[in-house]
Amino acid sequence: MNEQRRQILQMLADGKITADEAEQLIGALEREQPESPTATPPRPKARPKYLRVMVTSQDDDGPGRVNIRVPLQLLRAGVRLTSLVPPQALSKVNVELAKSGVPIDLTQLKPQHIEDLVEQLDDVTVDVDQSDAKVQVFCE
C-alpha cells in the first residue's frame, strides 16, 4: 500500500474525513497513476466497494422499500478504530454484546480478519423471496 493511500485511511480512522470522501480521494489516486507502457492482463473481477442490502415488502400500509449501501471501507475503518479503544472499555462492550446475544469479542478483531471477510463477501449473494417480501444482500 502506498503512502498516500495510507494517509487517506489514517485521516478516515481519525475522523477527519468521511468514508465517502476517503473513497473519492482513493479513486482520484487510482486515476492519477500513470499507465504502464506494457500491457497488463485484465483483472478477473473488480474488488467490491459496497455491501448492499435491499428489502422490498408489501403489507397493509402498501409497498415498502429499504435500500442500504454500506461502504466496505467503513468496516475497515471501524476495525482500525477498535485499536484506539481502551481494553477496559472493550471488555465492557463485549459483556453488553453478549447480553444482547451478539457473541463477538472485539479484543480479537484484527484488520486482517476484516480483509478476509471482505474478500469472501465478494462471492456472497443472498436472495430471500416470500409472497410479501424480498430481501437481497450482495456486494458491488
Image (tube, grey):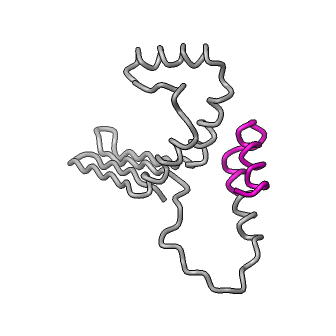
Q: Residue at x 67, y 46 (%)?
A: 19
Outermost bottom residue: 38
Q: Please say if 27 is above or below 62.
A: below
Q: Nearer the viewer, residue 114 or 19?
A: 114
44 left or right, relative to 5:
left
Q: Which residues are magenta?
A: 1-24
Q: Quadrant of the N terminus?
A: bottom right
Q: Residue at x 48, y 69 (%)?
A: 45
Q: Nearer the viewer, residue 132 or 2?
A: 2
The quarter of the displayed image where residue 103 is located: top left
Q: Main secondary structure of the magenta part?
A: helix
Q: Residue at x 74, y 54 (%)?
A: 5
Q: Please say if 38 is above or below 129.
A: below
Q: Nearer the viewer, residue 108 or 63?
A: 108
Q: Please say if 36 is above or below 97.
A: below
Where is residue 29 shown, x and y percent of the image? Answer: 75, 63
